[in-house]
Image (cartoon, rainbow, N blue to C red):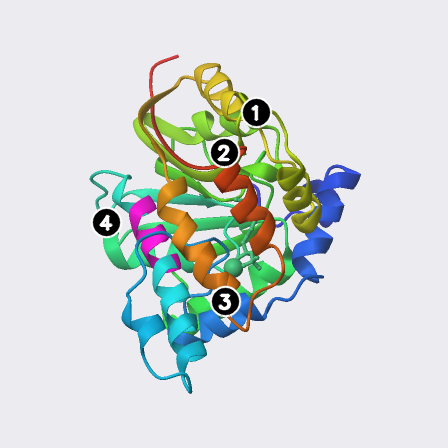
Amino acid sequence: MSTTNPATDVLRSGYQRSVAEYWNNNPNDDRVNVVLGEIDGLYHHHYGIGAIDPSVREGSEDDRDTRIINELHRLETAQADLLLDQLGDISPDDHLLDAGSGRGATSFMAHQRFGCQVDGVTISEYQVGFANDQAAQRGVSDEVRFHFRNMLDTGFGTATRRGIWTNETTMYVDLFELYAEVARQLQFGGRYVCITGCYNDVTGRSQAVREIDEHYTCNIHPRSEYFNALAANNLAPINVTDLTPQTIPYWELRETCSLATGIEDPFLRGYREGSFQYLLIVADRIAD
Ligand code: GPP
Ligand code: MG
């Protein structure tokens, strides 16, 4: 296993440097992540799923915004729970990898659920520092560790992982490169779980998708590319779910929140017109 990598080793292209720069100094309004994270210390960098509790909209107007903020956070935590549900039987002796770990919330939830070691990698040094501080505050620094490493070349050992996930991070990388690295690290029978936004090959890349790419400095892939890249790397899908209908209520609620960032409209347009899709993909590592 490699030890600390200098930034030149981790950030290997101008594009990767610009992505790191984005997440080190989020140029968009980050309050939607920080204020939600302060509710219970789980700082998510992904969206939510599930039905809205009707009392959020019905109650008194004075604290409606607070109720909306709490509800958005609950739906984001539900998204991470759904992702972790897909990992199958994980024992305390297993090792998991969070590829693109953000501020660490999905990793902490995984450790809490399975009691196993979790490593997170991110190319944002800010996020590594934030998430490791969180681990220290939680008293889990020996079990949940965050590293300044590139998910395309993590330095972790071959066939060392029982499970690997990407929670809304694949739009920053080449999928063929990523899945080669995922397959290398997974044990035979190990599981990969992905939640992502992809564009619909049938409609093509829409204006809404272009606006989302520009907002986050990312490059949303077509749906087909996921399956081509999985098949090319000995990763066999076992479950594919279109989560679009389950995420639209989150975006409708977020649009009415004081913490809305302006990206709500492209997401809702893309989802409603069918050009953008929120997808869960679960795959097993099969033999070479
Ligand atoms: C992270 O969420 C968003 C991304 C990693 C990029 C795009 C994702 C797609 C599904 C296309 P965030 O919580 O940092 O975003 P926001 O600040 O808008 O809540
Ligand atoms: Mg967010």
Could you tell which of marks 1 and 4 lies nearer the N-terminus?
4
The magenta segment: 76-83
Residue type at mark 3: give it: Thr
Residue 170 percent across, percent down from the top left: 54, 37
Q: Is residue 179 above or below residue 96?
A: above
Label at residue 92: 4
- To which residue does mark 2 refer? 274
Label at residue 42: none
Q: Nearer the viewer, residue 43 or 258?
A: 258
- To which residue does mark 3 refer? 256
Q: Residue at x 58, y 38 (%)?
A: 171
For label 3, the crowd category at 10 Å Cα-Cα, with few meaning under 14, some 14 to 19 and many 20 or more, is few
In the image, farthest residue toward the right:
14
- To which residue does mark 1 refer? 203
Q: For this view, does 71 lie left or right of residue 223?
A: left
Could you tell which of marks 1 and 3 lies nearer the N-terminus?
1
Dominant secondary structure of the magenta stretch?
A: helix
Name the image quarter holding residue 237.
top left
What is the distance, in whole Å, between disc 4 and disc 2 at their CAs? 41 Å
Residue 140 in sight from this viewpoint: no
Please report contact status of discs 2 and 1: CB closer than 8 Å, yes or no: yes
Check disc 4 and report its element: helix, strand or loop.
loop
For label 2, the crowd category at 10 Å Cα-Cα, with few meaning under 14, some 14 to 19 and many 20 or more, is some
